[in-house]
Image: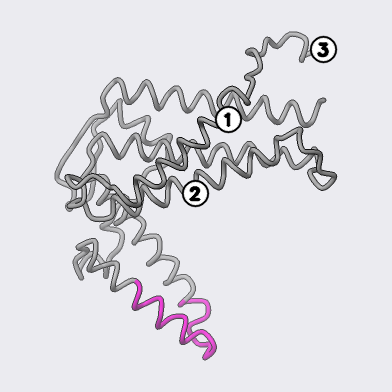
């Protein structure tokens, strides 16, 4: 009864855009890897982030295509597998949120992204150290992780003081915090002296993505569970 009261948008004929979309994704991957804009190469960490983002998105997209496909017939493609498409779609939306938010103030936000990531890695290391530090079979893993952390600390210009106290490094915000940034000035620990309010066009796009992923997830779950 509830389904009869819901008006869904018209179905998209995927074949209309399939080949063009495949070519676009492949071309974008190649451009980011081989022809990255020279004027952006001075922003440390930007190219690796974008390359990983497009390759991750490509794999998620291809996985969703397989799970949602009607053809070719595959007996191992169970209908209930469609339930994982919703969180996969959320992953794509999160990547796009990060790119849009980062682009608003490119250099400092790329720095923020990588420094926040370094903090998470350091905390992951500390948790494992606390739990398994006395076990000899973990010694090599800890040594390698320590070397990696030090390399990344130097690459992203993290001071020894901040490395010793990672709480000085703010986490990269989740999408809901990116949206809230429009309504109040972002505040950061002492390292981040700049303050920026997200502009209206960016807010509109982020709001659209937030609504889209909610509606899309509901429709996918509905179609799997109730049809």
Whether residue 119 is situated above or below residue 42 in the rendered picture: below
Look at the image and tell me in which quarter the C terminus lies.
top right
Q: Is residue 51 magenta?
A: no
CA–CA distance between discs 2 and 3?
39 Å
Callout 2: helix, strand or loop?
helix
> Could you tell whether 155 is left or right of 12 in the image?
left
Viewer-proximal residue among 175 and 70: 70
> Could you tell whether 22 is left or right of 126 in the image?
right
Q: Position of residue 16 (x, y in %)?
A: 59, 22
- Which mark, by number, is residue 56? 2
* Mark 3 crowdedness (10 Å alpha carbons): few <14, some 14-19, many ≥20: few
Q: Position of residue 109 (x, y in %)?
A: 26, 45
Callout 3: helix, strand or loop?
loop
CA–CA distance between discs 2 and 1?
19 Å
Viewer-proximal residue among 224 and 126: 224
Dividing the picture into quadrants, the one containing residue 7 is top right
Viewer-proximal residue among 92 and 142: 92
Q: Which residue is mark 1?
A: 18
What residue span does the magenta drawing correspond to?
A: 129-148
């Amino acid at each position: 009864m509830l389904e009869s009261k819901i008006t869904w948008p018209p179905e998209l004929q995927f074949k209309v855009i399939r080949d063009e979309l495949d070519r676009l994704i492949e071309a974008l991957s190649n451009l980011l890897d081989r022809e990255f804009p020279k004027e952006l190469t001075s922003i440390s960490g930007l190219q690796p982030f974008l390359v990983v983002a497009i390759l991750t998105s490509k794999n998620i997209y291809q996985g969703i295509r397989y799970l949602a496909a009607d053809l070719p017939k595959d007996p191992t493609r169970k209908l209930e597998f469609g339930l994982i498409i919703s969180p996969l779609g959320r992953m794509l939306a999160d990547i796009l949120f990060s790119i849009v938010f980062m682009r608003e103030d490119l250099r400092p936000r790329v720095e923020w992204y990588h420094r926040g990531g370094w903090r998470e890695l350091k905390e992951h290391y500390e948790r494992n150290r606390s739990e398994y530090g006395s076990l000899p079979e973990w010694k090599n893993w800890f040594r390698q992780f320590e070397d990696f952390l030090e390399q990344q600390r130097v690459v992203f210009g993290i001071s020894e003081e901040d490395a010793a106290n990672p709480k000085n490094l703010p986490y990269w915000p989740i999408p809901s915090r990116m949206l809230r940034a429009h309504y109040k000035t972002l505040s950061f620990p002492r390292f981040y002296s700049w303050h920026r309010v997200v502009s209206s066009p960016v807010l509109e796009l982020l709001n659209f993505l937030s609504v889209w992923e909610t509606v899309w997830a509901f429709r996918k779950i509905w179609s799997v569970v109730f049809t």
